[in-house]
Each structure stands twice: as structure tokens, then as C-alpha cells.
Amino acid sequence: MSNTTPPPPDFSPPLPDVSPAPKKSRTNLVIIGSAAAVIAAVVATGIVVVQSSKDDARPATAAAASGVPDEDVVSAAADEPDPDPAYEQVDADSFAMKLRTTSRHCFGSAGCNVTVEPDLTYVGIADIDPSAVYEITYEIRGDTSGPVIETAELSNQMNLNYTPTSISTASSGTKVSVTITEVVAQGE
């Protein structure tokens, strides 16, 4: 047997892979860039809105007619107190009132014991002073002993404080009605 070496292969052995590493996805970079652009756009829009609202508040004729710089006009206007808003003077005709029956106990021909509460509605055109407290006096008719006079207090334009009223009617068919007789703003 002879020592012979085998013939070399027809192809060269594989070389190690020296190609550049695959590129990483740029998705995160795109997301971060987009978020930064959106934030910058929101901030820029906010600045434009604030500046335009300041421009709208400035009297145009005062800034154009006088030689005073714009900042002085704005600060001078801000130093002046706002005039008190005008609120409607209210009276008995400024409101409408109905009665809400909360309980009724009838005793055949002896009549009924009825408890009622006022249901107040403002019917005026302009706003009423939200800081005022109004005393609203009203008269309930239908009680066997005659009219019952009650007073409710209206505060913050919508908070009505009252005491429910118990009356006795002559029969279950007696109509109970209410009329506002006076409205007084406390402190006047």
C-alpha cells in the first residue's frame, strides 16, 4: 500500500463570513423623531394661540394712534379694574313658582293634610347677581285657616333654601296655589 495523498478538492474551503452586520431597524428612531415633532408642533401652536389672544385683548386704536409701545398698552389695560357687570334688578315678576306636593293624607270628608315645597323658575332675560342672596316671599292659598306666608332664600343663582309647608285643606279636591309677593336682595 502506498502512501498517497488524496487529490485536492475541486472547490476552495468556505471562508468565514466577514460581511457587515445587518442594519438595525430604525423603527424606534422614527417613532422618537415623530413624537418630538408632534410635541414641538403642540408647543408652537400653544404659543401662537396665547399670542393671538393677547393681540385680541389689546385695543387696536390705542396701540395704533399713540406712539406707546405695545407692551405698555397691554400692561396699562391690565392695570385698569373691570367695571362691575350689570345684573338685572329682580322683583316678583322675575320669577315663576309652582308648588310640588311631597305628601298628602286625606281623611274622607274631614279634608287632607298636604305638605308642599316651592319649585322656583327664573323668567328674567339678563343674568342675576351670583353673589347676591334674594329673599323670596310667597303666599300659599288653599289652607282651611287662610293664606300661609313663607320665605325662601335664593343664593348662587340656583340654590333655593326653604322649609316645606304643611297645610290642611277642606277636601281632597281643594286646589292649592302659590303667588310670589315680594323679592328682596339681602343687604339692600
Image (cartoon, grey):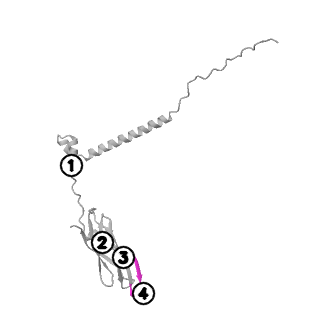
Sequence-wise, which precedes: disc 4 or disc 2?
4
* Residues at marks 2 and 1 touching, judged by CB atoms closer than 8 Å: no
Q: Residue 116, labelled with which disc?
A: 3
Dot 4 corresponds to which residue? 108
Q: Quadrant of residue 117?
A: bottom left
Dot 1 corresponds to which residue? 79
Residue at 31% across, 76% down: 178
Dot 2 corresponds to which residue? 152
Label 1: few (<14), some (14–19) or many (≥20) C-alpha neighbours in 10 Å = few
Whole-angstrom CA distance, mark 4 to mark 3, is 20 Å
Which three-letter amino acid code belongs to the residue tagged 3?
Val
Sequence-wise, which precedes: disc 4 or disc 1?
1
Label 3: few (<14), some (14–19) or many (≥20) C-alpha neighbours in 10 Å = some
Q: Nearer the viewer, mark 4 or mark 2?
A: 2
Check disc 1 and report its element: helix, strand or loop: helix
- Residue sitting nearer the eye, 60 or 11: 11
Which three-letter amino acid code belongs to the residue tagged 1?
Asp
Q: Which quarter of the rendering shows the N terminus?
A: top right
Residue at 32% across, 68% down: 160
Q: Position of residue 90 (x, y in %)?
A: 25, 67
Q: Range of the magenta residues?
A: 100-111
Whole-angstrom CA distance, mark 2 to mark 1, is 40 Å
Sequence-wise, which precedes: disc 3 or disc 2?
3
Residue 59 vs 128, above or below: the answer is above
Check disc 4 and report its element: helix, strand or loop: helix
Q: Nearer the viewer, mark 4 or mark 1?
A: 1
- Residue sitting nearer the eye, 127 or 166: 166
Q: Position of residue 165 (x, y in %)?
A: 34, 77
Check disc 3 and report its element: helix, strand or loop: strand
Check disc 2 and report its element: helix, strand or loop: strand
Which three-letter amino acid code belongs to the residue tagged 2?
Ala
